[in-house]
């Protein structure tokens, strides 16, 4: 018996970290429901080409009706669902007064309302499947102050939503945890070279993370190796949150710590 659920749905899985999570699950014998607003077919073809099992689902996570339809498809075709990774997300690196009401609404709709709609739609099928594990991809921006209000507030909201859901769904045997990546090299950071270069100076590990390093945390939380974990925050950031400030101060002091 595998330590992973038989069927896992990953949102935002047509690219970036979501695709890495989907590929890793496919390689472990999981049927992966690859969902995205972008075309999920290339990732599905890759998983199937490598001998795995996957299905493509067009899904805009902001639309509750689309969630209902996708979960209905999974119930009809797979008959069960043991894992959900709410990975789809967008970032707008804008300071407060540059954040328009439209940007605010869009970022909150994808990053926070998306996982809310997703958990409401998926939890009953997960309950009927005997329980399972939900992994919500927040960010370190959902654990510390971050200059861009829409992104930070949506990710802090997702941190809290995960804890609320963990309490609610425990009775159905569904665990809910959040993962908080630091800087990871994907399309999300495209066009932000000087921001990234400066940010890496505050990372004790001295580099950005690779998508696969976030995947390892997601796999752990989906697996039977984490059956007593729910409502937890898992930070995967090369030490940025815990030590970034003094890492930078010590480096800039030029070794004069007297
Ligand atoms: N890259 C980073 O440094 C970083 C750091 C912390 C957290 N995160 C979070 O990790 C997650 C994945 O980010 P990534 O870096 O792989 O981003 P990415 O831009 O490479 O991929 C995001 C995916 O989400 C999809 N998507 C966007 N809006 C959607 C919608 N409304 N419905 C369905 N799918 C949608 C996109 O089509 C894309 O395939 C996001 O939630 C992001 O906020 C990323």
Image (cartoon, rainbow, N blue to C red):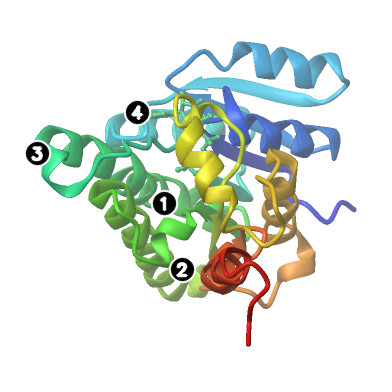
Q: Secondary structure at mark 3?
A: helix
Circle nearer the N terminus (2, 1): 1
**Residue 96 in picture, x, y percent from top left:** 17, 48
Residue at 76% x, 16% y: name it. Answer: 46
* Res 169 label: 2
User: Which comes sooner in the sequence, label 4 or label 3?
Assistant: 4
**Residue sitting nearer the eye, 71 or 193:** 193
Q: Is residue 137 visible?
A: yes
Q: Is residue 175 visible?
A: no
Q: Pointer 1: what residue?
A: 119
Q: Alpha carbon of mark 2 to alpha carbon of mark 4: how far?
A: 22 Å
In this view, 228 is above or below 7: below
Q: Nearer the viewer, mark 2 or mark 3?
A: 3
- The residue that mark 3 highlights is 101
Q: Indicate whether 201 appears above or below 35.
A: below
Structural distance between the alpha carbons of marks 2 and 3: 33 Å
Q: Are marks 2 and 1 in contact (CB under 8 Å)?
A: yes
């Amino acid at each position: 018996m595998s330590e992973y659920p038989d069927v896992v749905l990953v949102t935002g899985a047509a690219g970036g970290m979501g695709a890495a999570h989907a590929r890793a699950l496919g390689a472990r014998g999981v049927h992966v429901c690859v969902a995205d607003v972008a075309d999920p077919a290339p990732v599905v073809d890759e998983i199937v080409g490598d001998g795995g099992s996957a299905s493509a689902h067009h899904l805009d996570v902001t639309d509750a009706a689309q969630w209902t339809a996708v979960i209905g498809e999974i119930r009809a075709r797979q008959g069960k669902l043991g894992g959900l990774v709410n990975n789809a997300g967008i970032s707008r690196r804008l300071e407060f007064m540059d954040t328009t009401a439209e940007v605010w609404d869009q970022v909150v709709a994808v990053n926070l309302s998306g996982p809310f709609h997703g958990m409401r739609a998926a939890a009953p099928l997960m309950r009927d499947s005997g329980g399972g594990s939900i992994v919500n991809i927040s960010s370190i921006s959902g654990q510390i102050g971050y200059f861009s209000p829409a992104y930070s507030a949506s990710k802090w909201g997702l941190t809290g939503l995960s804890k609320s859901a963990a309490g609610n769904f425990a009775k159905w045997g569904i665990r809910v945890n959040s993962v908080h990546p630091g800087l990871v090299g994907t399309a999300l950071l495209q066009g932000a070279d000087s921001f990234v270069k400066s940010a890496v100076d505050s990372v004790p590990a001295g580099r950005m993370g690779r998508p696969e390093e976030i995947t390892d945390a997601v796999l752990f939380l989906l697996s039977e190796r984490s059956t007593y974990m729910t409502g937890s925050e898992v930070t995967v950031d090369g030490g940025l949150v815990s030590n970034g400030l003094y890492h930078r101060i010590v480096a800039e002091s030029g070794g004069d710590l007297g």
